[in-house]
Amino acid sequence: MIDFPAFYDALGIMATSAGSWGWIVPGLIVGLVFSAVPGVSITMAMAIVLPMSLYMDFFSAIVFLTSVYTGAGFGGSVPAILMNIPGSPSSYATTFDGYAMSKKGQHNEALGYALFASTICGILGYVLLLFVVEPLAGIVLKIGPVEMFAVAIWGMLLLGSLGSKYVTRGLLAAAFGVLLGTVGMNTAGFIRGTMGLPVLLDGISPIPAMIGLLAAGQLLTLAGKDYILDAEEARSVSVKKILAGCWGTMKYPGVLIRGSIIGIIIGAVPGVGSSVGNLIAYAETKRTSKDSASFGKGNPKGVIAAESAVASAEGGSMATMLALGIPGGGATAILLAAFMMHNIVPGPSFIETQKPMVYAIILNNIVQAIVLLVVGIGFIYVASNVVKVRTRYILPAILVIATLGTYAVDGSPSGPITLFIFSLIGFALVRYEYPVAAVVVGILLGRMLETEFLRSYQLSAGNPLYILQRPGAMAIVGIMLLSLAMTAWGKRKQAKQEAEEEAAMQALHREELATAGKH
Amino acid sequence: MKQFTRREALKLTAAGGLVAGGSLAMPGIVRAASYPTRPINVIVPFATGGYNDRLSRAFAPYLEKELGQPLVIINKPGAGTQLGHTYALQQPNDGYTILCTSASPYIPLTVLLQQAPYKNEDFWMINLPSRDYTLAATSSDSSIKDFKQVIDMLKKDPSSLSIGVQPASADYANMVLTMQAVGIDPTKLRVVTYDGGGPARNATAGAQVDVGFVGGEGFIPLKTKIKPLAIYAAETVSWFPEAPLISASGIKTDMVEGSQRGWAVSAKLKAEAPDVYKTIENAVSKASQDPKAVEALKLQDLATTWYGPEASNKAFLDNAAKMARYVDLLKS
């Protein structure tokens, strides 16, 4: 719970280090711009600015870096919504409904939804953090391989159902993705599928692979058009509509809260990060929604769910880092380095002795989320103008930027080469009607699935009853099975007794969509 | 990372210009006639934020002062350091490339297990100040009291405790050597593998595994969450004095040193341009013993002890030979 004297001291730190406030806006802009470039991840953006922060004093450096983190958490959703190309893996789920909304001419609203979900859940994540930073850290350490494996399966299961014409091709594509995800040296030290190339020892770099797969199909589609949006009147950029989207977010508190909880917990688990959280939050929201059929076709709830998980994961990840000195993901690993470069070692003793500083960092992040709202609207306004540019100018620009971005990931040609090879694979998949989404999910989750399964097997010595000693894992599996059973039961009911009613509901949705989609 | 190094280079050039200007005015700085005349690259075969990255950045200002030229830190992570080490050896032997790396265990490991295109002898150690050792530890709320108890339990039933360790690491070799020394069949153990020291430490602190064998230094921030059982060092370790030595448990076992980190160049540089090499060696030596550097690095828990090239190369090659001897253990 909140330690009030420390809290007042934290306010004091915030007030006395006024100079550090000046770093919020530049940090947010750096984060927004870098993460909006396809191929540059949040981690990458922070790695670029880390050396600069060495020249600042401690609190300013942390404010600057966490601002980049906050900005980057949202920036990726801009290309995801406008062009169906996620800036980073954590905004992958945003493409599903975000781009669908754009196609309907609702890009302003979609970006508004994403921004507000990002802001609110960013704040929500940190407010929760203020209360539970210590207990959360204790729980995180207790999450073991069995629990993690259950989470990975969850991600796989619910995403496998993402619209595909043929079930068999969907399964095949997912299996292909998982296989690609396991290339490299596994956790037990075995090397698979590297074709003797040392760069593949760490696995296929997920960012260039993902962008290659998604961009190939998308860019070809766009190449056939004059503009990203067909209808001329839809190519507007309107602050009013953006704000309408922002405001609309408030209508879905349930989606926001669920997304935040999933985001915080998954973000807090070391080594997972927000790229899994957004998938699970999206899939869960879709599954539990009454109008699940409209997901993927431009349902704002899809955008909100995905973005809320990404934004709140930041708070979760920070909790683990502050309380245990363990980075939850790449971005917090950079933050951790920044702390250490200023001679501060986060961890249990840091939280005990420096509580005001911990609170000040958390409070500052809340301020950042609020500032993001303003800076974000400006950024969206500028970025949205891309819909007014002819695709013949956009496409070459995207290709060049994506190639440079993937080159930047580790400063070697392996990035662009991966991008190129996966563009070809992506093209072939689209051409033969295999769902690209399933391959991407496989790549993102494949390694986690294998690693955690292997560790569970090693830990249990192959005894499946081991799960009985892990109440956490049983709970996750239980909820998962329950949700599956409910979905199956729902479908049966739908087929048998309520066929008519369902049909009526579907018709209603179609009508709604048709009205909404009318230009 | 190109962008990153450019920015860094710009910043450092600005700062370095001053240093360079200052150093010209200062006599008594040992320099070869025409070296160095431009910024020097420091290759770190790890991503930003790791130990070597922090070491290089913290040490750079002091080394810059001695060399009279700015240093540009270049991170080349990937393939268990093989990419960065290969890259460093591919650079011209003109003294404008220095390595800041975890020579042990990574150079021998990539040579032994990944058929890296270099040999241990292709590298020349200037100084390896940071030494890390395998620590056997358990969660702080575990019922295990000491290392002897672990061995007794495993002797009775090798699967009674789960063991967390990184495969193909010095820690793994140490763990297996210990088991062999006390007559436990390592293949019967319940070993859980982790692809990195960090995850293995988290699993240990969170009691996911009963005992973890991991590099001890990384445990420092988590000190309150673990109980050290045995450290694989010959004498008490300054940064973890409360960790009992493995010899204290009464077990006689051979051991491999966990990590030897610090400064290196290609062996060719020393052979082909001895003057240039000597300049670098002197600069590292002076900077390592600069009281200001020692103080600044100590605050960040970074090592500066000056062992010198002779001792460093001996330690590195001895340990590499040991790893080669136990290569079958590393292969797991």
Image: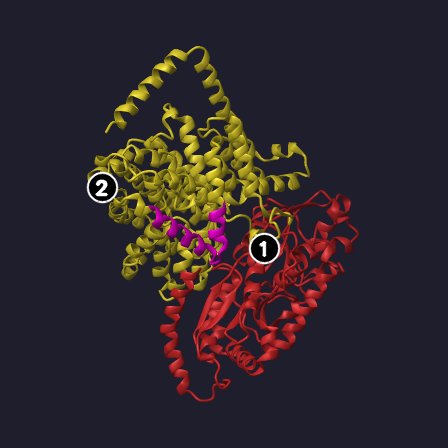
Foreground residue, B80 or A261?
Answer: B80
Rate crowding at label 1 as few (under 14), some (14 to 19) or many (20 or more) other CA atoms within 10 Å: some
Please state the extent of the stretch shown in magenta in the rendering.
Answer: A395-421
Answer whether residue B127 is visible to the viewer in this image: no
Quarter of the image for residue B324 reads: bottom right
Q: Which chain corresponds to the colour red?
A: B
Residue flagged by tag 1: what amino acid is it? Pro
Marking on residue B213: none
Answer whether residue A417 is visible to the viewer in this image: yes
Quadrant in which the N terminus of chain A appears: top left
Q: Residue at x 36, y 26 (%)?
A: A294
Quadrant in which the C terminus of chain A appears: top left
Marking on residue A237: 2
Q: Residue at x 42, y 54 (%)?
A: A44
Task: Classify A483 as above or below B273.
Answer: above
Marking on residue A198: 1
Location of residue A146 in the rendering, given as x and y in whole percent from the top left corner = 58, 38
Instruction: State the predominant SS element of the stretch in magenta.
Output: helix
Q: Residue furthest right?
A: B183
